[in-house]
Image (cartoon, rainbow, N blue to C red):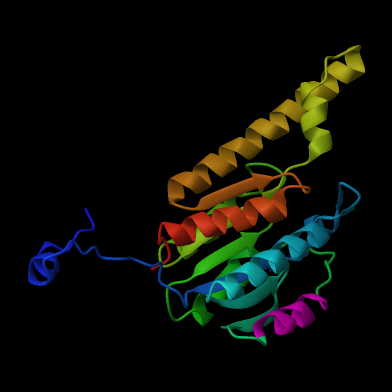
Amino acid sequence: RTIDWKASARHRRLLSDEYRAERDHQVVLAIDTGRLMGEPLAGAPRLDHAIQAALLLGFVALRSGDRVGLHAFDERPRMWLPPTGGADGFPRLLSATSGLAYGTGETNFTLGLTDLSTRLKRRSLVVVVTDFVDAVTAELMLENVGRLIRRHLVLFVALSDPDLLAMAAAPPDGTRALHRAVAASELLRDREVVLRRLRRLGALVLDARPADVSSDLVNTYLDAQRRELVG
């Protein structure tokens, strides 16, 4: 399929076209710093896991030739670091994330993601790192992520709770354990409903355990880059 028949005829030997993934894409790390991101998960606040994963992705994206920016938001937009590349990109990103802290208020997805959208002048890969409790409270999040998807490729990243998964899977040994298992299963079903809706909207979705989120996020980014989904 890659043989260039005209060039092969001119040179009297088989020549093929070589394709390389386009570089210099914009990757924007949109990190939720609201109240929910301060809750502990696997021994650390959710925000700590989010920042660690975002920094690894930023490092890989910069090494791949892309430009990386940062947007942090909770009740209102908290930080904006325009996408840049080159040798100074990662130290700049590292310095910016060191100043992030989780707030005490609910995340305002309308304000946070609308502000981000107005700043992006070209199609970008927007990595939204956040979390949610149930399908009801996720409605505004879904609505605003959906608006973002109309112009950009959105990679939605959420952190699954290993304790909740274990609770839902544990064999009940009494009435209290049974109630816990049922409640955990209902929360997981709600979560899957939201993630399915995000996929239908066109988002790439990653729901990973804290121990796996960094590597899974990098692999998802590399796959999107290989498939040239951003351009």
**Direction from residue 33 to residue 23 in the image, left or right:** left
Mark yes or no: residue 140 visible. no
Viewport quadrant of the C terminus: bottom left
9 and 77: which is toward the camera = 9
Q: Was residue 23 drawn as part of the magenta stretch in this picture?
A: no
Look at the magenta stretch and give its main secondary structure: helix
Splitting the image into 4 quarters, where does residue 69 fall?
bottom right
- Residue 101, how many percent across, how many down? 84, 71
Q: Residue furthest front?
A: 12
85 and 155: which is toward the camera = 85
- Residue 194, how many percent across, how many down? 58, 42
176 and 208: which is toward the camera = 208
Splitting the image into 4 quarters, where does residue 134 fall?
top right
- Residue 165, how many percent across, how many down? 77, 32
What range is drawn magenta here?
89-99
Vertical arrangement, residue 45 with respect to residue 41, above or below:
below
Residue at left offset 77%, top offset 25%:
168
Say how many tags the image has: 0
Q: Was residue 96 drawn as part of the magenta stretch in this picture?
A: yes
Residue at left offset 51%, top offset 43%:
197
Residue at left offset 52%, top offset 48%:
198
